[in-house]
Image (spheres, grey):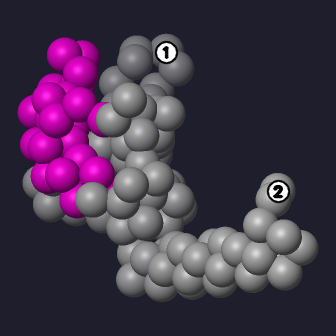
Amino acid sequence: MTLPDSPPDYLKSTARYMWRRIVPLIKKDPNVNNMDRTMVEAFCVNYEMMRNAYKHVQERGAVTAAYKTVVNPVTGEVISEDFVGYKRNPSTQIIDSSTAKLKQLGSELGLTPQSRDELMKLKGNAKEDKDRMEALKDFFGGKS
């Protein structure tokens, strides 16, 4: 059974777009089938997470100023707000982790030049193995 061209209903917006974009590409490999569906879904979800996190960073910046507020314990009045440095936007961590997962999943699915090259080498080795088996079968009388 092969991967469906239509994305699952629970994938939304950007993840659905990515499904429609990559499934036709990976279906060209005859070894890809419905068992790879989970990896394709994970790829699409991580792509959407990366895009959403990047949008958040664009809107709010990669870092924000951090302040410590000093309050009068009796009146509750703010006495001062002291600058304590900068704080990393948590979306930058989402970008980091989703990008790493995309790289790993993309490699598993044959979406990187290196992984495609390795897959082609494996296919070449399989053909050579088949040719050797045929030669041995012929040598020993043609029976397996």
Nearest to the observer: residue 10 or residue 143: 143
| Residue 141 horizontal side relative to residue 68, left or right | right
Q: Which residue is mark 2?
A: 144
Residue range highlighted in magenta = 3-27
Left or right position of 91 against 137? left
Of residues 137 and 30, which is closer to you in this image? 137
In this orientation, which residue lies closer to the viewer: 40 or 66?
A: 40
Which amino acid lies under the numbered mark 2 shown in the image of this protein?
Answer: Ser
Q: Amino acid at mark 1?
A: Val
83 is higher (above) or lower (below) than 44: below
Tell me the residue that label 1 is attached to: 74
Q: Earlier in the sequence, mark 2 or mark 1?
A: 1
Quadrant in the rendering for residue 88 = bottom left
Can the viewer see residue 100 in this picture?
A: no
Asked if the magenta segment contains residue 31, the reply would be: no
Secondary structure category for the residue under label 1: loop
Q: Residue at x 75, y 81 (%)?
A: 135
From this viewpoint, is residue 39 visible? Answer: yes
